[in-house]
Amino acid sequence: MAKQKSVFFCSECGAESAKWMGQCPACHAWNTMVEQELAVSERGKSVRRSDRAVKPQLLSEISLSEEDRVQTGIAELDRVLGGGVVPGSMILVGGDPGIGKSTLLLQACRELAARGQKLLYISGEESLKQIRMRADRLGNFPEGVSLLCETDLSLIAELLRSNKPDIVVIDSIQTMYNEEASGTPGSVSQVRESTAVLLQLSKSLGISVFIVGHVTKEGTVAGPRILEHMVDTVLYFEGDRHASYRILRGVKNRFGSTNEIGVFEMGSEGLREVSNPSEYLLSGRPEGESGTVTACSIEGTRPILLEVQALVCKSGFGIPRRQASGADLNRINLLMAVLEKRLGLQLGQCDAYVNIAGGMRIVEPAVDLAIAMALVSSFLNLPVGDRLLAFGEVGLSGEVRGVNAAEQRVSEAAKLGYEICVLPRVCAQRAGQIKGIKLIAVDSVRDAIEVIKKHGGKEK
């Protein structure tokens, strides 16, 4: 007869320990060890699987063929996936509650069914009527989309083996229950074992599986971190649930590039694609105001123009307040220290607020120059110019360093009608062949500030 044994799993990385510890020995995260009960045999010996021999294969003997991708019919989703859905792949979609994960996947099911794919949408959170109500808001659905409300993974596995659909959506993995694993639905062991069963079915039957995952308050998928390592693709649906725009970001993709993004707008009839993100991120930008500079960031292979806003004012408190939305606060403090040290600007007694308009979150160093120029523009109360764009990395000595894809950034700016581009000198030569835009090469932040004083409020 089997006896019960308790072990502890790390909810972040899935490391196992025989006793509870305050800090995980593998990933060094604090207070992440969760107790789970495991059933073991009385002797505690593992069973040998088989006596079959294994034979390695030479690397040169392995034939390669291009994956047959299935287009979802949603161009922004296909972009993030790397061109479409690869048969037999497993895709994890995470995001905050109410952000639109289920809506996006239901729209994808509609488009895929119109292309002759056999769809199965499995929900463990909503009833069939609730899903039908959402489907009616999205429009007419063709034949080929089947719905199922079930959380028992053994029943789901039998259904997949018998019906063999082309694409399956699991909403969500935290509601699935596997009888062979201990714990309640959503626990570390249940999420891990349920994903392993779905992964085996996906690879053996050639079924593409979309998994919806809840996220924690830190913004990562709830459950063991090993979940993201098991799947082929990890997508995060970002944005403010009270705002209209959503960003689908790929952070892992075994069949395409990472860090690609897709932009959507939430409406009454579901999600609409935004084919030109730069245009919507710059919409509503004030003209002739200080503290606002246009920057260009590279997301995957796509250059995106965005507005950097800064507000610098004298502080009424003993300790000045610094706040950032969409940018790294530590990076902003560093840039303000560089401006104060290298340019002599008295920013130490000023409150500073920096915002990336449109809900984007940018960590690329290429926006350093635009943030620094926006801070100085607000401090001096001097407009930069509505048709001026800046990009470049700022070092601790105040130097402006080169960034990648300079030619793509300048081309995107010229396409949207920008007339002046401030960029690092090392990038000016590669981007100098683009017509219709004036390039101003700078070596340091001091040179960039001189551009503000010369071109501020004027269009050249």
Image: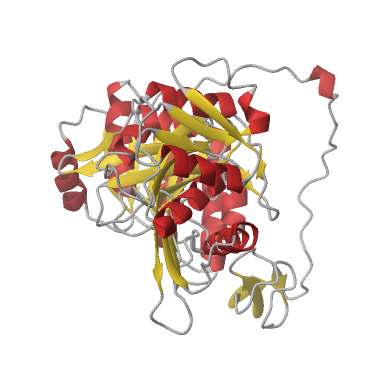
Where residue 375 appears, as percent x and y from the top left, is: 46, 56
Quick check: 1 above or below 402?
Answer: below
Q: Residue at x 41, y 44 (%)?
A: 293
Q: Residue at x 33, y 46 (%)?
A: 246
Foreground pick, 436 / 195: 436
Q: Residue at x 40, y 43 (%)?
A: 384
Q: Is residue 389 left or right of residue 428?
A: left
Asked if residue 162 can be seen in this view, the reply is no
Foreground pick, 153 / 2: 153
**Which corner quadrant of the image does residue 169 belong to?**
top left
Foreground pick, 184 / 102: 102
Q: Is residue 43 left or right of residue 449?
A: right
Q: Quadrant of the N terminus?
A: bottom right
Q: Residue at x 36, y 24 (%)?
A: 417
**Which corner quadrant of the image does residue 324 belong to?**
bottom left
Asked if residue 205 can be seen in this view, the reply is yes
Quick check: 398 above or below 391?
Answer: below
Quick check: 330 above or below 204?
Answer: below
Task: Kindly give the residue lying farthest to the front in the view shown.
Answer: 454
**Which corner quadrant of the image does residue 343 belong to?**
bottom right
Where residue 457 appears, as percent x and y from the top left, is: 35, 40
Where residue 35 appears, as percent x and y from the top left, is: 60, 79
Foreground pick, 291 / 263: 291
Q: Is residue 428 left or right of residue 260?
A: right
Task: Report how many numbered discs are placed on residues in the image.
Answer: 0
Colour scheme of the picture: secondary structure
Q: Quadrant of the C terminus?
A: top left
Where residue 63 appears, as percent x and y from the top left, is: 73, 17
